[in-house]
Amino acid sequence: MIKKIKFSFIGLCLIPLLYANASVAEPGTALKNDSLRTEPYADAKITGKFNRGDNLDILQKKGAWLQIKLNKNTGWVRALSVKRGTASSKSSSGGLQTLASGRAGTGQVVSTTGVRGLSEQELKAAKFNESEVKLLESYTLTPEQGQAFAVAGHLKTVKFSNLKAGKGDTK
Amino acid sequence: MNKPNLTIKPITLFLATLLAVPGINAAAFDLGGALKEAVEKEIKQKQEAPPAEPQAPAANAENINHNNAAEATAFNWKNPSKDEEVLLGREIAGNLLGAAPLVKDVALQQYVNAVGRWVASQSERPDLPWRFGVIESSDLNAFAAPGGYIMLTKGLYQKLENEAQLAGVLGHEIAHVVKKHQLKVIQKQQLLNMGAGFLSDKYAKDNNLMSKAIGSGAEISARSLDKSAEFEADRLGLSYATRAGYAPLGLPDVLQTIGHSSKNDNSVALLFKTHPHPDDRLSALSDAVGNKLDHMPEGKTLEQRFYQLKN
């Protein structure tokens, strides 16, 4: 009897540990086919591939790269190739599962009971507020003031062309 | 510009609502389709070759212009000037602020304006009088109006973790203004309205053109743009923030966060209704970026100076 109690006690103590372990690696899903690399650099050695929709674990983030674990392989991938959270079923946390399904058109989002929300109805009923616009306009900065703010934050302009649509854009 | 005409008066509200409903114009007149085509052609041509006044491509459009010239408000709907664009945006911004006022935190508003101004300076329209505001709403959303009026909700601001993410969100809205996404929608609607007015004197005599164009209240802010316009704003928003020296993944980070909201969550109801799903936006961005960020500097996130809300 005492033994039994002891065991369940130990079991109970282990539960938080299990959760703690689980939270280290965040689940993720591959957004596209891409490669797994040994280091967080494009020219690092490629050690594996993964496909769109693959479930994986995110271990850490470094700049625009994520270290992930996929099956038994660990490596670095471009952060934009991965979506945080799981897209498909099977995880036990019901809360997470509803996350990805809020596509436009599926939800009947007419009723809004939220506090100080901004529903369509509220927007339609809105009346022009002159003093608030004046207040908004009073915050307008000059380009020079913006530049000074950038300098203060050690922000330096970088050459980068406007991105063009990729193949997935028309979906 | 005739200022008193700019505020929406109750008498014209019904008419405005009526005219703002897409489809009614087209259904009411046989010429609807032809008119729409002429209007679209007109806007496109004006946007591509602005300064000179080229020959109007269709008789309808020509008449629309003359009709307009006789109006008290001689707003050039075919080819609005920068001042006219700002005036129109001011009207929309004022209506939106009527629904949700600014958060009364001067330091917050100044901070957001500094970030926004710097990002806007990396866009193709640095000369606009860009202004930014955080509005009182627990919703997650952001709005842009022509001429450089940009607002984001307090709810969305509270989800942000650093300055690079703020820069990405503002960059997306800045791109809408630069590409005149909303302006084009309003222009199209307005030219259609005026076409209707030309055909039916009843409408032509109504001077309140501005309210007719933007509908009732801040309704225009609740309308959806084309999906392609949203994807384009994502690509440009990321590009502007990157050029400004920020970590390029600020905007995608925010999309990741928003994507974790349940569709049953009221705070994202309007955002999800008017935008492609964050997952689709992330995929599209991912495809557009490809390997283009591989050799870019990491950029700054500046969480240490990210303004923390008091409550």
Image: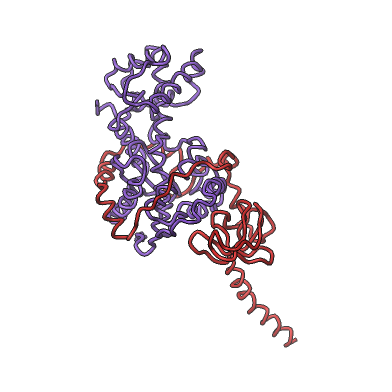
Chain colours: A red, B purple
Report the residue at 39% width, 62% height from top.
Answer: B303
Q: Nearer the viewer, residue B82 or B201?
A: B82
Q: Is residue B188 visible?
A: yes
Q: Residue B20's x, y, as percent?
A: 43, 26
Looking at the rendered image, the quarter that the C terminus of chain B falls into is bottom left
- Hey, which quadrant is residue B9 in on the image? top left
Q: Please state which of residues B44 and B198 is positioned toward the viewer in this rendering.
A: B44
Above/below status of A19 relative to B142: below
Kindly indicate the quadrant of the structure image that contains residue B86.
Answer: top left
In the rendered view, tell whether residue A55 sits above or below residue B40. below
Q: Quadrant of the N terminus of chain B?
A: top left
Residue B210 versus residue B294 in the image, above or below: above
Looking at the image, which is closer to me, B287 or B58? B287
Is residue B189 in view? no
In-front residue for pair B148/B195 = B148
Residue at 41%, 13% in the rendered image: B60
Occupied quadrant, residue B158: bottom left
